[in-house]
């Protein structure tokens, strides 16, 4: 397993220091699983995440929200009986139904709770996450049982702006597709076990549970990428309730770390036996996007959050 990293120094004459010559360090790393590179900048290079007035956004979006209790039954679609006998899948407070805008042959949306229009990331409890993930596991099983060709499964989240969510009300999105996404293709034959062995007990290791090992990504795809490796089930469709609960508990702890770092938003992707999370934000007073030319066109994240620092913070949350 090759954890390749190269350090460079950028040199310029700094107007803030009477044009004295300064050297700024930076590091390029390559992800051993995907080959994707990232650029690590010195801490403090990027402005802090800009805070949203979540309550104001909640009030603005609540009156027409299709995922709130008053409208969910009449405004969200239902699955044919082959996928869900009752049209929708329920577990605890969570409700799953088809995505009105399908991104895959089988495409679902599952709200954590029709009664909870606004859930800040630090309030996503293990119970809310476990129940919602469980609806997605049930959906994945039903979709693949009904349509065996749609075997590429993922469970995903855009949580609150600026993660890409078009509906404010917090939810997950599931996908069962006959074809893999780019990342599913890249990770399909990746040496996950070797990666975990190489990172175990290292400075990016966060926690080892009964079924899941959590590790801060060596070469993150975005701010504070953390990965969970599920050891006892190779596919989401094989996750039992205990595994779902452990994954949910880990995600909840990671989201508290993100909140501690000033983030209010995240993306999640669970595919195969790999859970990946990344923090999302608008930065500074211009509300700059966290994706610029580097991320969009070079497929290379630039972040000033060192994975080793993220892991140290997360270890405290898992302790
Ligand atoms: Zn709502």
Image (spheres, rainbow, N blue to C red):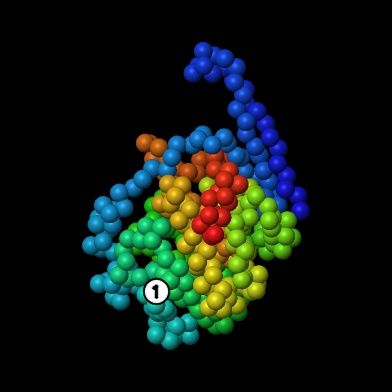
Question: Does residue 199 sit above or below 284 in this rendering?
Answer: below
Question: Does residue 284 sit above or below 30 in this rendering?
Answer: above
Q: Which quadrant holds residue 205?
A: bottom right
Q: Residue at horizontal 69%, vertical 58%?
A: 200
Residue on which disc 1 sits? 94
Question: Does residue 192 sit above or below 296 in this rendering?
Answer: below
Question: Does residue 176 sit above or below 120 in this rendering?
Answer: below
Query: What secondary structure is marked by label 1?
Result: strand
- Residue placed most toward the observer, 258 or 274: 258
Q: Point out residue 66 in the picture as x, y percentages from the top left corner.
A: 30, 67
Quadrant for the C terminus in the image: bottom right
* Residue at disc 1, CB closer than 8 Å to ligand 1: no
Q: Residue at horizontal 37%, vertical 75%?
A: 93
Q: Along the horizontal axis of the image, is 316 left or right of 163? A: right
Q: Point out residue 138 in the picture as x, y percentages from the top left corner.
A: 50, 79
Q: Along the horizontal axis of the image, is 9 left or right of 292? A: right
Q: Residues within 10 Å of mark 1 (few under 14, many from 20)?
A: many
Residue closest to the far front: 319
Q: Which quadrant holds residue 239?
A: bottom right
Q: Is residue 80 visible?
A: yes
- Residue placed most toward the observer, 124 or 107: 124
Number of dots carrying numbers: 1
Q: Along the horizontal axis of the image, is 171 left or right of 174? A: left
Residue closest to the far top: 18
Q: Point out residue 173 in the picture as x, y percentages from the top left corner.
A: 46, 66
Q: Point out residue 143 in the picture as x, y percentages from the top left corner.
A: 53, 78
- Residue placed most toward the observer, 150 or 207: 207
Q: Residue at horizontal 50%, vertical 68%?
A: 248
Q: Residue at horizontal 34%, vertical 59%?
A: 168
- Residue placed most toward the observer, 101 or 235: 235
């Amino acid at each position: 397993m090759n954890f390749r990293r190269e350090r460079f120094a950028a040199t310029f004459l700094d107007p803030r220091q009477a044009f004295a010559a300064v050297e700024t360090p930076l590091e390029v790393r390559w992800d051993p699983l995907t080959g994707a590179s990232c650029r690590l900048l010195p801490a403090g290079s990027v402005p802090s995440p800009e805070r949203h007035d979540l309550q104001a956004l909640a009030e603005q979006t609540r009156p027409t929200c299709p995922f709130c209790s008053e409208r969910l039954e009449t405004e969200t679609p239902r699955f044919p009986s082959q996928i869900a006998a009752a049209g929708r899948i329920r577990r605890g407070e969570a409700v799953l139904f088809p995505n009105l805008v399908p991104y895959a042959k089988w495409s679902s949306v599952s709200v954590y709770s029709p009664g909870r229009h606004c859930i800040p990331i630090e309030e996503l409890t293990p119970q809310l996450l476990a129940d919602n993930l469980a609806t997605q596991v049930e959906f994945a099983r039903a979709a693949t049982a009904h349509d065996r060709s749609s075997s590429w499964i993922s469970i995903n989240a855009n949580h609150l702006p600026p993660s890409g969510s078009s509906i404010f009300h917090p939810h997950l999105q599931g996908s069962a597709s006959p074809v893999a996404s780019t990342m599913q293709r890249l990770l399909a034959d990746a040496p996950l076990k070797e990666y975990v062995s190489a990172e175990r007990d290292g400075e990016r290791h966060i926690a080892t549970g009964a079924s899941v090992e959590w590790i801060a990504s060596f070469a993150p795809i975005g701010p504070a990428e953390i990965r969970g490796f599920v050891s006892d089930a190779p596919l989401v469709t094989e996750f039992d309730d205990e595994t779902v609960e452990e994954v949910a508990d880990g995600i909840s702890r990671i989201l508290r770390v993100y909140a501690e770092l000033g983030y209010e938003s995240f993306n999640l992707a669970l595919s195969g036996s790999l859970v990946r999370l990344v923090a999302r934000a608008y930065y500074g007073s211009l509300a700059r996007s966290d994706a610029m030319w580097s991320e969009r066109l070079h497929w290379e994240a630039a972040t000033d959050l060192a994975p080793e620092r993220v892991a140290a913070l997360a270890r405290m949350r898992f302790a």
